[in-house]
Image (cartoon, helix red, strand yellow):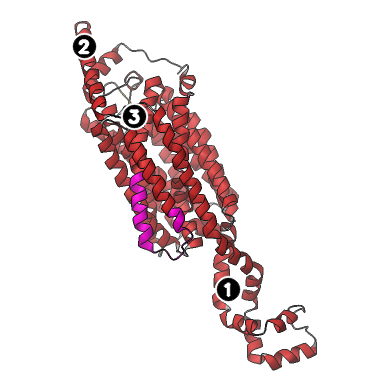
């Protein structure tokens, strides 16, 4: 058994096919576990490396920009194959994450983080290409729903592990846990993952009953050696439009992955652990929605009605979430049940979309599947990078709260009695502040002793470091706390706008609206397959 040449000469039997699909899904989950673990411990990483919020956002901007161009490189999977990109990509990603906690400074961390995104950009294209290869169209939505669980379950793993372990572990430990898990999965994929030969994967397979015809055609098919014209056939509105539409539809998802912990910390005062526990509701519901929508879509044999229903539901859920942003007294379980609804609607949208998109690509050129997915991956990463860059511009309150919020909160708690003394004599202490410590005129010092007393002055002197923090940052943090909820509400409304923009592009994708017409198409296809097989039988 070769660990490099992984081509299968025939379409695999069901048990083997499900094994390959399962390995692809597990490697995708682990890859996103590696990628998203940084965001779950964002505040700890920023504190460790003395990062500003702007610098932390730069990590995401640079990483996604690098990942966008890595997705274009992954278009070569039509020529070179997909499996090795996945197997050795997981290995490199695991090694990078194991090195991240040892990064000596934030610049090194940025470089390693960007390299991790480069690997992710390649695997983002190679894994759905493998899922497409191993799943006929009549089971495509279920298979794609399983693949899409990669980022969703990856997020769920992140929040589940961190909410259970952060009280006894460090952020470095959390990254190492992820790296070790990825090494285990790499070994499984190294020995277990295979892929179809080019002659097999370059064909359209509508149902498993096409297997005999696909294999018969493959015996006389010579795949084109250089993937000539693949990019030209994929750079058309029917591919570019839906790829852009799903990218802006996912604006809320990007914000949930990268900023949900920061949002709940800044606006609702949640700890990292509590915010991650709340996010579990969203990721868990999304995972259930993906599988249920995939099964339903394949049973009905339509994609578009489910995408529209999921898109409309997502708009409604995000509108409610945006309205709650300015109501800081909203209860934990109100958010939890809202996340359940939003997660189910996102699954209802995304699993059928992935199936419809790959089927749309196949209509133009089934041999260019990875190229079409590379176009989607590039657009997706560019949108993520742009949205990450604009977030701190739209939500300016985040920076002072993230950088100085805990410092100000601690100073207020420690200097509470001293603040009460200062607040009782504002004019006196304002006058004392005009002079260096201990150098106030004798008459002013005497007045202070008389009005405040030696004990009160000693209390204020002891709390001077905390009072300086409050003087330097207190007003900015207070202003940000007041403005933050409204700014976050506006950002959630931007995310809702992306979901609205998604809806018209459903109409340019391939596929039927009516289940009855879809069944008729499948029956006509089966008759055509049987006819072609009967013609090929004598020559075979």
Give the vertical position of 216 relative to 267 (above or below). Answer: above
Q: For the residue labelled by badge 3, is the local secondary structure a helix, a strand or a loop?
A: helix
Observer-side mark, 2 or 3, equals: 2
Q: Nearer the viewer, residue 414 or 141?
A: 141
Callout 2 secondary element: helix
Q: Which mark is residue 531?
A: 2
Residue 267 left/right relative to 142: right
Figure quadrant of residue 428: bottom right
Spatial separation of the CA atoms under disc 3 and disc 1 = 56 Å
- Looking at the rendered structure, the secondary structure element under dot 1 is helix
Tell me, yes or no, whether the highlighted magenta stretch contains residue 324: yes
* Crowd around label 2: few <14 · some 14–19 · many ≥20 (10 Å): few
Question: What percent of the width, then of the height, locates residue 515?
Answer: 25, 30
Q: Is residue 7 above or below residue 191?
A: above
Q: CA distance from mark 2 to mark 3?
A: 25 Å
Q: Position of residue 523 (x, y in %)?
A: 21, 21
């Amino acid at each position: 058994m070769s660990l490099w040449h992984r081509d299968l000469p025939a379409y695999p039997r069901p048990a083997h096919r499900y094994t390959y699909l399962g390995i692809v899904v597990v490697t995708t989950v682990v890859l996103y576990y590696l990628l998203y673990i940084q965001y779950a411990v964002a505040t700890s990483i920023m504190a460790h490396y003395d990062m500003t919020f702007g610098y932390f956002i730069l990590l995401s901007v640079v990483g996604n920009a690098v990942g966008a161009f890595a997705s274009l490189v992954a278009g070569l999977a039509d020529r070179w194959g997909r499996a090795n990109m996945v197997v050795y990509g997981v290995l490199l990603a695991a090694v990078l994450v194991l090195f991240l906690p040892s990064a000596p400074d934030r610049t090194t961390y940025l470089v390693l983080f960007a390299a991790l995104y480069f690997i992710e950009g390649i695997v983002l294209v190679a894994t759905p290409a493998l899922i497409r290869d191993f799943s006929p169209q009549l089971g495509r939505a279920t298979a794609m729903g399983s693949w899409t669980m990669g980022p969703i379950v990856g997020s769920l793993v992140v929040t589940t592990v961190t909410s259970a372990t952060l009280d006894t572990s460090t952020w470095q430990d959390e990254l190492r846990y992820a790296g070790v898990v990825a090494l285990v999965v790499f070994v499984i994929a190294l020995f277990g993952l295979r892929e179809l030969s080019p002659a097999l994967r370059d064909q359209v397979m509508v149902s498993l009953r096409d297997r005999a015809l696909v294999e018969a055609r493959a015996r006389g098919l010579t795949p084109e050696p250089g993937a000539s014209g693949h990019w030209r056939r994929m750079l058309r509105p029917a591919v570019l439009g839906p790829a852009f539409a799903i990218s802006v539809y996912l604006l809320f998802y990007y914000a949930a992955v990268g900023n949900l912990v920061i949002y709940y910390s800044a606006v609702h005062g949640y700890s990292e652990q509590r915010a991650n526990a709340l996010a579990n509701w969203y990721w868990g519901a999304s995972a259930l929605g993906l599988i249920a929508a995939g099964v339903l879509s394949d049973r009905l044999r339509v994609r578009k009605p489910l995408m529209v229903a999921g898109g409309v539901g997502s708009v409604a859920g995000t509108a409610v979430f945006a309205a709650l942003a300015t109501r800081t007294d909203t209860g934990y379980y109100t958010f939890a049940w809202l996340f359940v609804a939003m997660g189910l609607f996102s699954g209802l949208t995304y699993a059928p979309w992935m199936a419809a998109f790959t089927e749309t690509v196949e209509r133009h050129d089934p041999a260019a599947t990875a190229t079409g997915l590379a176009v989607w991956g590039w657009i997706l990463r560019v949108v993520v990078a742009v949205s990450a860059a604009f977030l701190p511009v739209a939500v300016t309150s985040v920076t002072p709260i993230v950088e100085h919020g805990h410092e100000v909160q601690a100073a207020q708690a420690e200097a509470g009695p001293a603040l009460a003394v200062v607040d009782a004599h504002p004019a006196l202490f304002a006058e004392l502040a005009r002079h260096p410590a201990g150098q106030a005129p004798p008459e002013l010092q005497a007045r202070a002793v008389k009005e405040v007393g030696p004990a009160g002055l000693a209390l204020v002197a002891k709390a001077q470091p905390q009072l300086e923090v409050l003087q330097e940052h207190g007003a900015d943090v207070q202003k940000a706390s007041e403005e933050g909820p409204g700014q976050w509400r506006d950002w959630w409304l931007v995310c809702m706008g992306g979901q609205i923009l998604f809806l018209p592009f459903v109409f340019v994708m391939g596929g039927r609206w009516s289940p009855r017409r879809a069944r008729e198409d499948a029956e006509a296809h089966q008759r055509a397959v049987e006819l072609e097989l009967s013609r090929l039988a004598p020559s075979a």
